[in-house]
Amino acid sequence: MIRNILAVIVGYLIFVISAVLLFQLSGHKPHGETSVPFMILVIIYGAVFATVGGFIAQMIAKSKTLTINYVLASIMAGFAAFSLFKTDGNHYTQIVAIFLFAPMSILGGYLFLKKKV
């Protein structure tokens, strides 16, 4: 049980810390107006780190099912939905987190399970 909780926390931290670093290092605001090329970078970058987070979560959990990844995806989508309704400005990051990044964390777990087979 502790391993599963740790797996979800680590998977989420991989995703969140990478996003914070991207916005801090680039000088862009997550909810500010931005260029289309930067939006595309954010989407690709976020999808990669969501997948990595799901992969690492599954590796830590050592589970044979995707349950950990479903929990991780739910938390990612839940925080994004909460942020969507509580912040002003551009909401592309939250929308993409709900509809792309959360499912990509499930894909990360799936890729880990397939790697083991």
Image (spheres, rainbow, N blue to C red):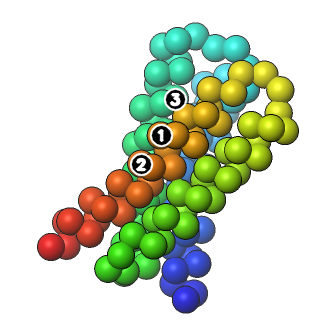
The residue type indicated by label 3 comes to: Val
Percent from the top left, x then y, of residue 86? Answer: 84, 39
Task: Report the mark closest to the observer, 1 or 3.
Answer: 1
- The x and y percentages for residue 62 are 37, 81
| Cβ atoms under marks 3 and 2 closer than 8 Å | no
Q: Identify the secondary structure beneath mark 1.
A: helix
Q: What residue type is labelled 2?
A: Met
Residue linked to disc 1: 100
> Label 2, on which residue?
104
Where residue 50 is drawn, which disc sits there?
none
Q: In the picture provided, is 87 more to the left or to the right than 21?
A: right
Q: N-terminal of the two: label 3 or label 2?
A: 3
Residue located at (49% from left, 64% from top): 70
Structural distance between the alpha carbons of marks 1 and 3: 12 Å
Label 2: few (<14), some (14–19) or many (≥20) C-alpha neighbours in 10 Å? many
Vertical relation: 113 (above or below) 31 = below
Tag 3's secondary structure? helix
Residue farthest to the bottom, as pictured: 1
Q: Which of marks 3 and 2 is in front?
A: 2
User: Front-most of 100 and 59?
Assistant: 100
**Residue 85 drawn at (x, y percent):** 80, 38
**SS category of the residue bearing label 2:** helix
- In-image side of 14 versus 58 (left or right): right
Q: Is residue 26 something one can see in this rendering?
A: yes
Q: Which amino acid does label 1 sit on?
A: Leu
Binning the other alpha carbons within 10 Å of mark 1 as few (below 14), some (14 to 19) or many (20 upward) gives some
Q: Name the residue under label 3.
A: 42
